[in-house]
Amino acid sequence: MKSAKMTDSKYFTTTKKGEIFELKAELNSDKKERKKEAVKKVIASMTVGKDVSALFPDVVNCMQTDNLELKKLVYLYLMNYAKSQPDMAIMAVNTFVKDCDDSNPLIRALAVRTMGCIRVDKITEYLCEPLRKCLKDEDPYVRKTAAVSVAKLHDINAQLVEDQGFLDLLKDLLSDSNPMVVANAVAAISEILETSQTAHQALEMNSQTINKLLTALNECTEWGQVFILDAIANYTPKDDREAQSICERVAPRFAHANAAVVLSAVKVVMKLIEMMDQSSEFTTNMIKKLAPPLVTLLSTEPEIQYVALRNINLIVQKRPDILKQEMKVFFVKYNDPIYVKLEKLDIMIRLTNQSNIAQVLAELKEYATEVDVDFVRKSVRAIGRCAIKVEAAAERCVSTLLDLIQTKVNYVVQEAIVVIKDIFRKYPNKYESIIATLCENLDTLDEPEARASMIWIIGEYAERIDNADELLESFLDGFQDENTQVQLQLLTAIVKLFLKRPTDTQELVQQVLSLATQDSDNPDLRDRGYIYWRLLSTDPAAAKEVVLAEKPLISEETDLIEPTLLDELICHISSLASVYHKPPTAFVEGRSIVMRKALPPRSTSAGSPQGLTAVAEQPAAAPQTQHTVIPGADSLIGDLLDMDLGPPMHQQQFQQTPAAPPAQSSGAIDLLGEGLDSLLGSGAPLPGDQAGSGLGLAGLGDIFGVPQTTFYVPPQEVWLPAAKAKGLEISGTFTRRNGVIQMEMTLHNKAMQPMTGFAVQFNKNSFGLIPSNQVELKVPLLPSQTANVTINLNTNGPVLRMDPLTNLQVAIKNNIDVFYFAILVPMHVMFVEDGEMDKRVFLATWKDIPTQNEVQSEIKDVQHNADTVSQKLRNNNIFTIAKRNVEGQDMLYQSVKLVNGIWVLMELKIQPGNPNFTLSLKSRAVDVYPGIQQTYDIILHQG
Amino acid sequence: MSASAVFVLDVKGKVLICRNYRGDIDMSVIDKFMPLLMEKEEEGVVTPIIQHGDNTFFYIKYNNLYLVSLTKKNANVAMVFTFLHKIVQVFCEYFKELEEESIRDNFVIIYELLDELMDFGFPQTTDSKILQEYITQEGHKLEVAPRPPMAVTNAVSWRSEGVSANGNVLRSEIVGAVKMRVYLSGMPELRLGLNDKVLFESTGRGKSKSVELEDVKFHQCVRLSRFENDRTISFIPPDGEFELMSYRLNTHVKPLIWVESVIERHAHSRVEYMIKAKSQFKRRSTANNVEIVIPVPMDADSPKFKTTSGSCKYAPDQNAVVWTIKSFPGGKEYLMRAHFGLPSVASEESEGRPPIHVRFEIPYFTVSGIQVRYLKIIEKSGYQALPWVRYITQNGDYQLRTQ
């Protein structure tokens, strides 16, 4: 026995010269005790970072000992230095092999554990035999250690491990009688699967292995339970019944004291309830069971709380109901670390609703008076988010913010002004009475965002602020020193002011335009300046329309994670990805196989009533309720013969294909004379001329001139050749103007006689297209003449599902005969103008549509960036609802509504430098997919 | 899956001891840890997870030590943090106290423990009772006063927090635990019976007095699936002291010690406190060692106190007054007045308004009403064992906001 005073610290004290030499002598001493002391000194030197690799042969010489403590130290030394001395490491192999045969299981395990940590390629193959033996050792302690060693060896030389059949041996261990062995085997398997594609076949989990794991779950250590649960989370059951039974057996883990076990169990259940009928009692009960363990995680150590909170943030986005009653547990405590406070705040806002808003506001107000600046700022911002989220509480939020502004605490005031701007936008014409109070604080604002917000408010409400011009002017003095966002905002605000009060603000607007266009190096600012200037000079009415346009509503939820990423992150609960809120590929480098996880699709064996109603609502997409075959030729003719080819009921409309919109040049010149002169005052030189940039008015005219038709109209093609229609050739195309689908046709008379009495009719078709006016030519179409005809189409005609969906059968009659032809209508003319889905609805819908409805395709070789793409699509009523940049790639979330009310949701992935875009479609009516894909393909390859 | 390496650092970031578990990282990356942490602290964006290139640091702080784990993968963070806390627990149980000195004094055994605690980044055996069976080397314990032994103990703590200044209880819950100290030989099978509402209802005793446990957490020795099935708490206990279970109740209870405060601040001259404490439990119970900690400004001076009971002490290191009442019977009310001078020049730094904390314990009383109905011990040899149960209520995290 050592005395209590004799501690290991004495080994650190030798610092004299010649130390290595002395140690060498001691290591080679005959006395066991002296040897041991020497090794301890070596380890102590190693611990403080001294290089003792020179002693390698001497230390390895001590390896053959029956003293366990000494052996452990030598092994430790080996692990540290083997890599730097690979040639000498081979000296140790013999002892390893021998130790793997030792009668003491502790030594066998120690040897097999250390072997795997010697990452020297040369000796790896010598380790296979001892490892194989240890995997079948009689002692479970050795087997569980050997299981992990398989993963170690695989990490060094995967090929060797797979060739030598270790994967099968490892798989056998899943049936081991000892749960610790099973758990480590599971851990090793998960590890190997992460890096090896080939291992998948050998190690694939099936329901039997999962069953074994679930049995072992009840008996192994807390960590083993984590390994097993994480492995189960990677398994997708074959149907909802299996999913349910796994959930039932995993749920008791919610009562485990170890937070990691609880979170891994939550992961499994969150994933598997996706597969089940959402309205079933089982699902409801399971969801109820999730709340208490999540709440209890908030009583753990702060670091674990932080992990839990980041995960809860995901869980409440996926399933808001789980914690909706638990607002209070997220109230911030005085002694919470700041990272816990900020996360709690975020979740509080997510859970805020009308019923708990009063409590939340009282809390937030309290927080806003604390001392931690970041926390206070976020609290003030949170009050603004509450106002935007819960309309009924907006007024209370505003008055709370006003109270806070009265505190005159600089950063509180600034933060409050930023959020009040958003509140103004969300609820126009409601709270403007407080503007006066805001203006009082103008001088104290020194942060760009706050200054920009205040300027926005002044510009937006210029007509109500008597001295708006003075206020804005006061900012102009230091214009050059302002941050860009302030400059841009100031420019816009002054233009707004001018449009509202043109009489006395000319000088101001001239000043700001000149500052923006001439004195600035910032292209954004200059461009905006020129645009305003041009707008004001050519068409003040248009300028009003543009600058004072009604603004789109702002979304009530911010920072929502996009749905596919959210689903992926749910599969990563309790891992680093769930804390970063990024997919693992964003921060784990190369070696592991990129395998994106996704939630399992809802199981089909569960009759989902929602699914059925959804189909029933959309007849066009419900083949089982409609005839799917195209009617035979006879019936088609029958239908067409039935049609009323008599005198058209509508007033004959003969339209020339509309020319370009009325030229504006003359107007522009007028306005230049009047508008601009009055704007700039006589004698003032034009800023553009002064700059001598050559960007005179003519140049601007080119840039901002006649707007182009942006809706994509395919070129006309021949629908009916003359040979088939007794000399009548019809070519045509489809377009959409002002919300009306139009069929544009060119009729060419190639016959020898004049043609009269044109009429057109459609057969039943998928979208119920029906002509709303008729073709009537005032004068007969003479031989070799052409006439352009536009027919407006309604979509309330009889519906019959066609194949392909956009097939349209047309009959056209003239004085000579009736002719039939079939054409494909480009899908995008069916996209209606109000197809922009609300963000929230989008998220909910995306979640709601089963994953099996999701289809991915690639659009090759697109030469546009994300912004151009979304503009192009928007011109064709494909609306980009959100754009997000995920690990450098742009994700566009888009929606389309078809004339028959079918919604299609899109996710367009654009990777930098990759001209091939990935398009994912989600809709309840999968039949429309080919048409949508085609549309994207065409539109994105235009211009 | 989890940690590539574990480091123990001193307060300046110097490595005291480390273990490389996976060999996939450059161990010198740890030198970046402290500068990164300081940078984050300066920016005010401290989190327990720090990303550096493709390495991620996870850390916890204990006494004057940092325990840091490093990974390159999408590690199971919850597991890494519970593991780091577990290391602390194991080291504490081995060395009584964990600090820089005890690391140096025990580096050999720490290496041995690190070898057993984790393998290739997978946590292994972390139960110090089991470890002590085969990591037999005598640890060099720091000399710390021995703790009094406890018999089989059932401790129940009571907790309420965030009582707002205007006297509303913002949030309260009861968090309790059943702790055991077991000295039994052989492989005894134990069964614990509580007055659990769910159990009573399922067995038709719905009318008896029972408590509804909102959430329960068990020591890993308890058979969870058994509990899930029929609410039976059955287990084979480890030897010695451990926490068998903890539970949480949402029952709303009156704060046992109710504190009201009136604070009058006269800027640049003085601040006065009037604190009223009232015990809101039955007269036959008594709270012991009641401590009411009232925060005062940092620059306060010349304290003066007056109390109807107990004693007051100014604790400048905590910026607080501690009012101690050794024995506080139920249904009583005590008063305390304090007076501090303030300097005429106000300090630049604004101070937060820390809450008032209350500490106490009430023996032979459970606020939750939880009861141990029986503790059955089944062992093959059939020896007689006498269980003994003690109830106690303690404050939890009890905070009162001040104006």
Image: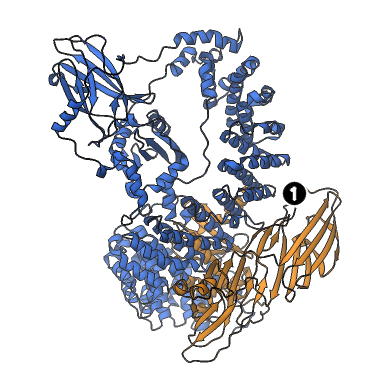
The answer for which chain carries disc 1 is B
Q: Nearer the viewer, residue B178 or B6?
A: B178
From the image, which quarter does the N terminus of chain A lie in? bottom right
Counting other residues with Cα less than 10 Å from the Cα at mark 1, is it few (<14), some (14-19), or many (20 or more)? few
Q: Colour of chain B?
A: orange
Q: Is residue A468 above or below residue A163?
A: above
Q: Nearer the viewer, residue A449 or A249?
A: A249
Residue B275: quarter of image: bottom right
Q: Secondary structure at mark 1?
A: loop
Q: Colour of chain A?
A: blue
Q: Which residue is mark 1?
A: B349
Measuring 51% from the left and 81% from the top, which residue is drawn there? Answer: B191
**Residue A677 visible in rendering:** yes
Measuring 44% from the left and 61% from the top, which residue is drawn there? Answer: A286
Q: Position of residue A769 (x, y in %)?
A: 29, 29
Q: Position of residue A280 (x, y in %)?
A: 40, 58
Q: Nearer the viewer, residue B354 or B327?
A: B327
Q: Amino acid at mark 1?
A: Glu
Q: Position of residue A814 (x, y in %)?
A: 19, 17
